[in-house]
Amino acid sequence: MTWSRIAAAFNYHGALLDIYVLETSHQDWARVWDLLRAKPERLTFEIDGQAKPPPAEVAEVFNFYPARSVLVSYRLGKQRLNCHFFTEEEIEFDLDPRDVDSLLEADRLVGFLNALGRATMKEVLLTVENSPDEVIARYDPTSDTLEWSVGY
């Protein structure tokens, strides 16, 4: 992977990028929650905009939603990956493409996408915001590889 090949994927056009793991279960969420909690210095947890200690179990996070606003942020270098816990059937993070401004930052993101896929043993998609069909990169759990779409 070279920066010149993928840099265009992170050009800012007024939209965020999304990371999706589709058709998820509570077990998938639990594995991802464990992955996030393994590096507590990278993790912030907010309820209704107030920082709180992250709960030990992901089920506790879902107990807050939808009555309260839940935001989990995970830091990767310059990047802030945000997860809102909208539904148990889909894991979704968003990120600002302007934060991926070098090969180092892209490598960090690729490492996270691979870790998500390995934790869930499911396909992971990096897409244009709210557009799971506009795939920029895809992690394939069968081959344990991440492939960039044509043009990236």
Image (tube, grey):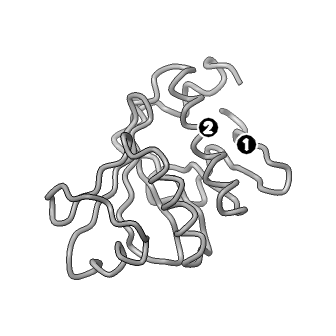
Residue that protrudes farthest toward the front in the picture:
56
| Numbered circle sitting on residue 146 | 1
Q: Which residue: 45% across, 22% down?
A: 101
Q: Which residue: 56% across, 24% down?
A: 7
Indicate the secondary structure of the residue bearing disc 2.
Answer: helix
- Please tell me how crowded label 2 is: few (under 14), some (14-19), or many (20+) other residues with Cα within 10 Å: some
Q: Quadrant of residue 147?
A: top right
| Numbered circle sitting on residue 110 | 2
Amino acid at pointer 2 = Val
For marks 2 and 1, give the CA distance.
Answer: 7 Å
* Marks 2 and 1 close (CB-CB < 8 Å): yes
Relative side of 110 to 67, left or right: right
Relative side of 107 to 74, left or right: right
Amino acid at pointer 1 = Leu
Indicate the secondary structure of the residue bearing disc 1.
Answer: strand
Residue 99 placed where, x, y %? 39, 30
Residue 73 placed where, x, y %? 34, 50
Q: Quadrant of residue 149?
A: top right
Question: Which quarter of the rendering shows the C terminus?
Answer: top right
Q: Earlier in the sequence, mark 2 or mark 1?
A: 2
Q: Is residue 144 placed above or below 33 in the rendered structure?
A: above
Q: Which residue: 35% across, 72% down?
A: 61
